Image: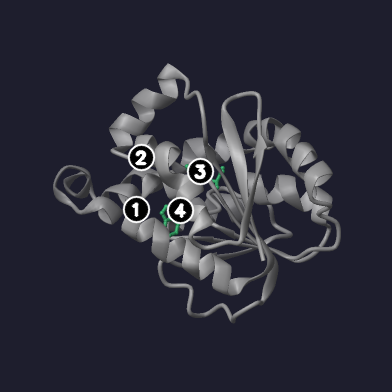
């Protein structure tokens, strides 16, 4: 992937370029990311007891979300990402966790109902609705109990809005439509909201 893909590539090529480019920086702030996620994981654990569940994390980045949630689940943890550089940083930061290079839109190597929780943190807002729908369906197929999506919900800080603009993400439509998108897949969607304007959307199976 080169800068050419940022300007002239399709959405996926642009995203891969961006995430490979920022992976070393992401790796350095991984601990800060975990500290930031600790509070919402605590709220999540109060809403849905996490202990004993296995977790598959889609778009794991450097593994910060997976490591945070893993403190509560204390079961098997696996992270998946399509950026080889993110996977490299994740392996450096979390040597005890298994990471796999794979595209979220093609998770055929994971069997139906093979993980208790299938999660994704700040991944789906980056995709357009049709790709999001494919990924949510795949996550539902693999999950035994819960699909948990941590992402934008209400207020988004101006600096984040700028970064999302640079990434050319779909975060505005995501915020408007994602509850309805979850409702088409799950009988019940539970929302665990953080003070910073984000939420974990939990699809119950
Ligand atoms: C904003 S980062 C979030 C990383 C991590 N989940 C977290 O919360 O810290 C988005 C991650 O999703 C990955 N990603 C985006 N689209 C993907 C896809 N189609 N397949 C696999 N990974 C993807 C990117 O490479 C990147 O690591």
Ligand 1 within 8 Å of the CB at mark 3: yes
How many angstroms separate mark 2 from mark 1 (CA)?
8 Å
Asked if residue 97 lies left or right of residue 187, the reply is: right
Badges 4 and 3: C-beta atoms under 8 Å apart?
no
Residue 197 in the image: state x and y as whole percent.
Answer: 57, 27
Q: CA distance from mark 4 to mark 3?
A: 16 Å
Quarter the C terminus occupies: bottom right
Are the residues at dot 1 and dot 4 in contact (C-beta closer than 8 Å)?
yes
> Of tags 3 and 2, which is closer to the observer?
2
Query: Pointer 1: what residue?
Result: 129
Q: Which residue is farthest front? A: 187
Residue 35 visible (yes or no)? yes
Q: Which mark is residue 36?
A: none
Q: Residue 192 vs residue 173: left or right?
A: right
Q: Is disc 1 placed on a helix, strand or loop?
A: helix
> Which label sits on residue 122?
3
Count every numbered label the image shows and give the total: 4
Q: Earlier in the sequence, mark 1 or mark 4?
A: 1
Q: Is residue 80 above or below residue 94?
A: below
> Residue beneath label 2, please?
173
Name the residue carrying label 4.
181
Sequence order check: which comes first, mark 4 or mark 2? 2
Q: In which quarter of the view is residue 18 placed? A: top left
Which residue is nearer to you in this view: 136 or 30?
A: 136
């Amino acid at each position: 992937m080169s800068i050419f893909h940022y300007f002239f590539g399709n959405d996926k090529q642009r995203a891969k370029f961006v995430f490979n480019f920022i992976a070393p920086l992401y790796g350095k702030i991984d601990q800060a990311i975990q500290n930031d996620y600790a509070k919402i994981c605590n709220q999540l654990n109060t809403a849905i007891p996490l202990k004993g569940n296995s977790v598959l994390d889609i778009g794991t980045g450097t593994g910060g979300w997976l490591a945070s949630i893993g403190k509560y689940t204390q079961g098997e943890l696996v992270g998946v990402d399509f950026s080889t550089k993110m996977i490299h940083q994740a392996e450096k930061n979390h040597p005890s966790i298994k990471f796999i290079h794979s595209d979220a839109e093609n998770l055929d190597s994971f069997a139906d109902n093979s993980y208790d929780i299938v999660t994704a943190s700040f991944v789906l807002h980056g995709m357009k609705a049709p790709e999001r729908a494919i990924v949510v369906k795949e996550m539902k197929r693999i999950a035994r109990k819960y699909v948990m999506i941590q992402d934008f919900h209400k207020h988004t800080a101006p600096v984040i809005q700028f970064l999302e603009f640079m990434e050319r993400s779909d975060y505005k439509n995501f915020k408007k439509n994602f509850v309805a998108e979850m409702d088409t897949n799950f009988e019940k969607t539970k929302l665990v909201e953080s003070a910073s304007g984000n939420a974990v959307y939990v699809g119950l199976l």
